């Protein structure tokens, strides 16, 4: 019986590291810019290193490949979209104004 508990504890311990990475909040490198995603009053906000005011992230959908699509909103307009991998460690950002894509890499 103890062996069963040890196996279960080991599986939970091994998966804990993967679960910790599955948070949207954190520091990211998006192209050459650093950005911080935080939750404030129940809303996701992104703080860019080159912009004073944060923009808001709004969940859009999951893809068939289990990627998460989030729209970046600023002053009521969509200015970009994030396509995160299921673990939020990487993805692609698409700037709305010109369609240019930037790689996303989580720093934490």
Image: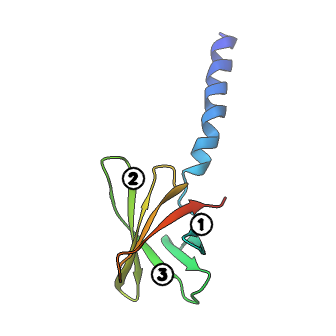
Is label 1 or label 3 in front? 1
Q: Residue 21 appears at what percent x and percent y?
A: 59, 50
Give the residue pinned by disc 2. 67
Q: CA distance from mark 1 to mark 2?
A: 17 Å
- 10 Å neighbourhood of mark 1: few (<14), some, or many (≥20)? many
Q: Is residue 54 above or below residue 6?
A: below
Is label 3 or label 2 in front? 2
Give the residue pinned by disc 1. 28
Residue at the (54%, 51%) spot, across then down: 22
Which of pointers 1 and 3 lies earlier in the amino acid sequence?
Answer: 1
Q: Residue 41 appears at what percent x and percent y?
A: 52, 74
Task: Say left or right for 58 vs 52.
Answer: left
Give the residue pinned by disc 3. 55
Whether label 1 touches label 3, CB < 8 Å: no
Q: CA distance from mark 1 to mark 3?
A: 15 Å
Residue at the (64%, 33%) spot, across then down: 14
Q: Is residue 65 above or below residue 82?
A: above
Find numbered disc 3 in the image and state the secondary structure of the residue it sits on: strand
Find numbered disc 2 in the image and state the secondary structure of the residue it sits on: loop
Q: Residue 54 appears at what percent x and percent y?
A: 53, 83
Give the total number of marks visible in the rendering.
Answer: 3
Residue 3: quarter of image? top right
Residue 80: quarter of image? bottom left
Which of pointers 3 and 2 lies earlier in the amino acid sequence?
Answer: 3
Find numbered disc 1 in the image and state the secondary structure of the residue it sits on: strand
Q: Where's the N terminus, which quadrant?
A: top right
Whether label 3 touches label 2, CB < 8 Å: no
């Amino acid at each position: 019986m103890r062996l069963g508990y040890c196996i279960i504890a080991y599986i939970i311990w091994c998966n804990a590291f993967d679960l910790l990475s599955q948070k949207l909040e954190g520091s990211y490198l998006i192209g050459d810019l650093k950005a911080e995603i935080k939750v404030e009053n129940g809303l996701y906000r992104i703080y860019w290193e080159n912009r004073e005011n944060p923009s808001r992230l709004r969940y859009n959908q999951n893809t068939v490949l289990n990627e998460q699509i989030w729209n970046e909103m600023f002053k009521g307009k969509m200015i970009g979209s994030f396509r995160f991998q299921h673990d939020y460690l990487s993805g692609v950002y698409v700037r709305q104004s010109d369609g240019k894509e930037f790689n996303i890499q989580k720093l934490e």
